[in-house]
Image (cartoon, rainbow, N blue to C red):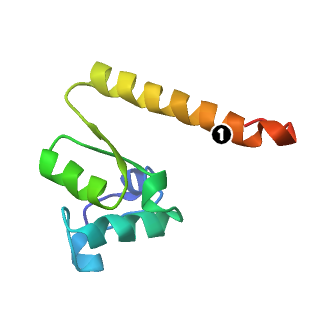
């Protein structure tokens, strides 16, 4: 057991290598993780501090952020989310929907 109930509640899904039969940076690991979340890899933002894992995520189409510090991570994530919000708004603008 790695996680207690409180820790486990923090995650929407866990792709543990011994359960899925592969590990980062194998492409299959990222694809399985996205599938477990019900998304396509290109809809994910993958965050890690190791370049090799970022490269694996990028190989399946994930957007990545290299974690170096919380302020840097927070800034890059906010920028990505802001860009995504604008894209979503443009996509749904013709329907007068807001997200």
Residue 97 position within the rendered picture, expressed as x and y whole percent measured from the top left? 82, 39
**In the image: residue 21, left or right of residue 84:** left
Q: Residue at x 43, y 63 (%)?
A: 34
Q: Looking at this view, is 9 or 32 the one in front? A: 32
Residue 33 position within the rendered picture, expressed as x and y whole percent measured from the top left? 38, 65
**In the image: residue 71, left or right of residue 89:** left
On the question of residue 16 being in view, the answer is: no
Q: Residue at x 55, y 36 (%)?
A: 84
Vertical placement of residue 46 versus 81, above or below: below
Give the structural element (helix, strand or loop) at label 1.
helix
Vertical placement of residue 30 versus 84, above or below: below
Q: Residue at x 31, y 28 (%)?
A: 73
Residue that mark 1 sits on: 88
Q: Looking at this view, is 2 or 53 the one in front? A: 53
Q: Looking at this view, is 10 or 62 the one in front? A: 62
Quadrant of residue 28 within the rendered picture: bottom left
Q: Residue at x 54, y 27 (%)?
A: 82
**In the image: residue 30, left or right of residue 51:** right
Quadrant of residue 30 within the rendered picture: bottom left
């Amino acid at each position: 057991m790695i996680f207690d109930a409180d820790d486990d509640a923090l995650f929407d899904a866990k792709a543990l290598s011994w359960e899925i039969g592969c590990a980062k940076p194998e492409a299959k690991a990222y694809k399985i993780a996205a599938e477990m979340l019900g998304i396509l890899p290109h809809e994910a933002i993958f965050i890690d501090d190791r370049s090799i894992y970022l490269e694996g995520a990028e190989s399946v189409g994930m957007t990545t952020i290299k974690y170096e510090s919380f302020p840097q991570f927070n800034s890059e994530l906010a920028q990505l989310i802001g860009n995504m919000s604008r894209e979503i708004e443009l996509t749904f603008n013709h329907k007068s929907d807001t997200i």
